[in-house]
Image (cartoon, rainbow, N blue to C red):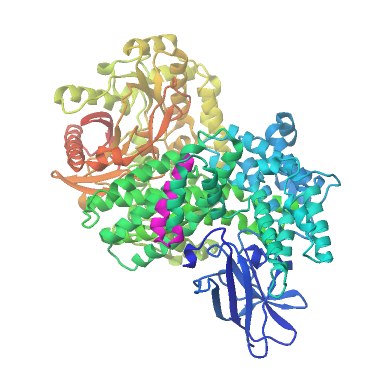
Amino acid sequence: GVGEGDCGKMSSVRFEVECETEWGFCVGLLGSDQALGGWNKKKVQVLSTGKDLYPKWTLDCASVESVENAEYKYVLMKDGNICKWEGDGPNRRITAKPGADGVIVQNDGRLGVSKKAPPQQHHSHQQNGNIPRSESALNLLDAFGSALAREDAKNGSWRQKLAFVRKVFTDEKYAQEVGFDSAKLEHLVLVVVYLSFLKNGQVPCSEDGGHYRPNHHANEARQIEETLRAIENPKNSFVLRKIYPLLPSYSSEFTASVPLTRIRDIAHRSDIPHDLKQEIKHTLQNKLHRCAGPEDLVTCERILDKVTQPGANYSGEFIHQMHIFHRELREFFNASGLEQQLEALRDRKEPADSSADFINRFMKAKGENFAPIDQLAALVELRQELKAHMKELNDGEVLQRVRLADTHLENYAFVLLAQTNQEVERFAGNERWGAHEWGFVLRSLELSLDNVVLSGVSPAECEAMRSETNAMLKSGALGNLSRSDLLRLRAAIERLSRFGDDFSSEISALYLGRVEPLARALGVDKHAADVFAEAEIRANVIFQMSRAVNASLKCIRSMLGLPPWDALLPGTAIGVVRRAARIEDLSESMLEKPCIVILDHAEGDEDIPMAVKGVVLAHDLPHLSHLGVRARQAQCIFVCAEERRVFDELCSNASALESNDKFAELVVSMSGTVELRDHSASSAKGGSSGSASSSLESNLSSVKLPDVSARKVLQMKEISAESCGAKSNAASELFSLANAKARFSAPVSIAIPFGVFNDAQKRSSEYSKRIKAFDALPLSEKETASSELRALVESFEVPKEVLDAIQKSFAKNVRVMVRSSANCEDLETISGAGLYDSISNVDVGDRNKLAQAVRSVWGSLWTKRAALSRSQYRVKHENAMMGVLVQEMVRAEYSFVMFSQNPIDRARENEVYMEIACGMGETLASAASRGSPYRFAVEAENVREIAMANYSVALLPGDGNGASAEHANLVAQTVDYSKRKMTTDKQYREAVVNKLAALARVLEKEQGRAQDIEGAIIGTDVYLVQTRPMVV
């Protein structure tokens, strides 16, 4: 069929459409293919009619290159100008199949027209004409963007413009002069945009008065590519591969001293008229050999169209030579089709002798119209073959040909995936999929990921996702999926969804804000600029993969019976509606009234202002993260969107309430229903249904004046809550319990008591003055004030004897956690979770790093969120004191947070509720990484599986010597869940989860109240590092 038509193979298409026109009007067609005008308004293809045909109009196009990719629209014309475009909607595509004679007859029925329906083109070949350059747009570009636009204005010819690009890559001094940095993705993107506009004719070229044959252009391309190969790395390869097809070929036939000589012979043929000889000689031959540019290909195609029109009557040999030259010219401009490029590789035995078999298998699958998914499999095998040999190629000319073929294969993969998705979307009508549907979808996703990896986009992440997809595909369970299987499948598909969203965001961030001002500065058509970034996203394989992902998630949610919302704290909240990207973006004026906040993003470490009574978050969040704990402490109704669709709908409904500053009521049920409605009758005051039962006074009373009498490092048996804080005291008790009960392990710990910090702060008279004045400051000044106080504290000296004592307490090669242990955290009514810093992976043998870590923990007493939290709960700043807990670090295989009672669903409060993640616990506690943890609830050894993990990375200890900021010395390692026992081994999973639940019950009994517990798992061994009262 047409959808599987040959890329690069010329096809004959007859367009037919019915349209009744007024006198003087005619019907035209304009499209993306050069034979359809290349979206150039000056090259509209006019349809013909007659008294026996009207109102039917027809157009015969003999040389449409890529029918499966071609897009077009009809227009009404008068006096050679476009008057109206056909109606709104997407561009048309060629859907008919070739007839017995090979001609495609595309009957488009009856035509409707509109004055406001320009083509939704992705790649325009329209010359920019007389669009003026915008000087003001230069101010919106950085130094390189401005220099690029200014140099383009100076450089008329294609050769000069290519030379500028070459110079910024090869001449370091010149690059500095124009502000170019090849390490910046945004600068590489500007090069992509510029070369794209140049190749598509949006940036016009003019003769420069010199005489430079095309070999000069080819050598410019060779030098550019050599530099690109030298700077390529995993972060920039997906951008660099967009540059290669935009350069001319530097194959040996084009670097010869006199290339492209066939046109000279054609211009001197004796079998063509004199006028045509002169036209070829002056508009093509001389121009090409004097000052080549993309416009020469347009000229060649115009002449070829002219001499091949019905009734032209030129000799067959002349036409044959023109076609050969046209093909040669397309090769020079790297505009050849896929089949032509693959045939050339096969004939040349490139990149290796073995490659011919892969090329033949793919071309057989394509030529014989194999199912799209089978063509895709053959395509992936061919791309893998090319990729394997690209690493070994030293010949740049061969490498260029192979890389261009690979780029065309990537583009064709997009077409095949679009066809595959039609099958996937047919499945979407079924609420439950079986082995056939899941097998097809997973194979499609696996092949999609293969293509993404081969295109250099996030290879480690894609390899891990592919491995998990493949494991599910081969599991043999697709015909009878258990709940565990569905949860695993959901985790894998959601990771794919997140990857697609992140890629779209990254591309948008790279292109938006740069394309539009550069286009204006270059005088490029506004429409071409508007669609550029969208085209980069939508024309990518990842876009097609996301279509299959969305259909899969819809089915999984249906099969699991999941709601679109995840309630962290259900209930009713009343307040005015506030919209913000993040909590910290809420201004003082926005918090003057009780409010319901709709947020785009949360890191998980934020504090919740007292005025906030309800939160609606656009993405998922670990239930037991610091932010989740604080929401429960503040009795702030909190719900997360599991589907972007429902979040967008809520935002749309909330806009009127927000603009009118009306009080609204947010109602969140445990079952996952969410309603936001007008509640103007309650405008006098706001609140939430679960307003904290403990008063601010009880919070204040729970913060006791610290005992500052101890001024030396305290060992395990010497630690108390009064002298070192509740966290240090709990660590000491855990160590004693571990020795007594022998059911878990606890790390060796020591503590720096409050007295050491007290002595240090007493030596600074400035500190006392500043903290007494802090609460009187307006909110707008508190961030600066808290930063200055933190810097002051971090200048305090850590006594030599304290460092000596720490080092004597641990072996020399041990890494330690240096953790906060303030007197205003881990209390029964104030959790303080995550308000203060902990420093991971500190080398106890390095005194400087050790002292730096202690000062960083002391200084975290004055993070903005910690200071504002104390003010909110009326804790006097002068009474706040920081102890430091130093623990031997446990190199966790898995980390967990668990509550001995279910904090989410109080009807199930007898359940132990836990979340587990790969690697160190910072992933869970802060929620800075997007994704979900393993989530379980246990009652009487009955494990209820709620979610499987899909975080992309695990945080692991690095090889450095500690850091001055939280998490900075942990390294992110991509997680492959197909190799994680917590995912793959149900028996192991349930054994570990039941063991954790049993420990939670023991600790609750020992402490006499519900506990919030953190720890690590290595194999089946459990290490508990912290326990504190559970705040509910």
136 or 897, nearer to the observer = 136
Left or right: 353 in relation to 141: left
Q: Quadrant of residue 781?
A: top right
- Residue drawn at (55%, 78%) of the image: 108
Name of the residue lying farthest toward the left: 940
Left or right: 684 in relation to 93: left
Asked whether the viewer can see residue 604, the reply is no
617 or 828, nearer to the observer = 617
103 or 714, nearer to the observer = 103
Asked whether the viewer can see residue 199, the reply is yes
Name of the residue lying farthest toward the right: 209
Left or right: 6 in relation to 697: right
Magenta residue check for 376? yes
Name of the residue lying farthest toward the front: 270
Name of the residue lying farthest toward the bottom: 52
Against 287, residue 966 (above or below) is above
**Main SS of residues in magenta:** helix
Magenta residue check for 290? no
- Residue drawn at (43%, 56%) of the image: 364
What percent of the width, then of the height, locates residue 837? 42, 30
Total residue callouts: 0
What percent of the width, then of the height, locates residue 839? 41, 26
Against 207, residue 72 (above or below) is below
Q: Quadrant of residue 453?
A: top left
Against 759, residue 920 (above or below) is below
Against 705, residue 717 (above or below) is above
Bounds of the magenta segment: 366-387
What percent of the width, then of the height, locates residue 49? 67, 84
The C terminus lies in quadrant: top left
What percent of the width, then of the height, locates residue 269? 78, 59
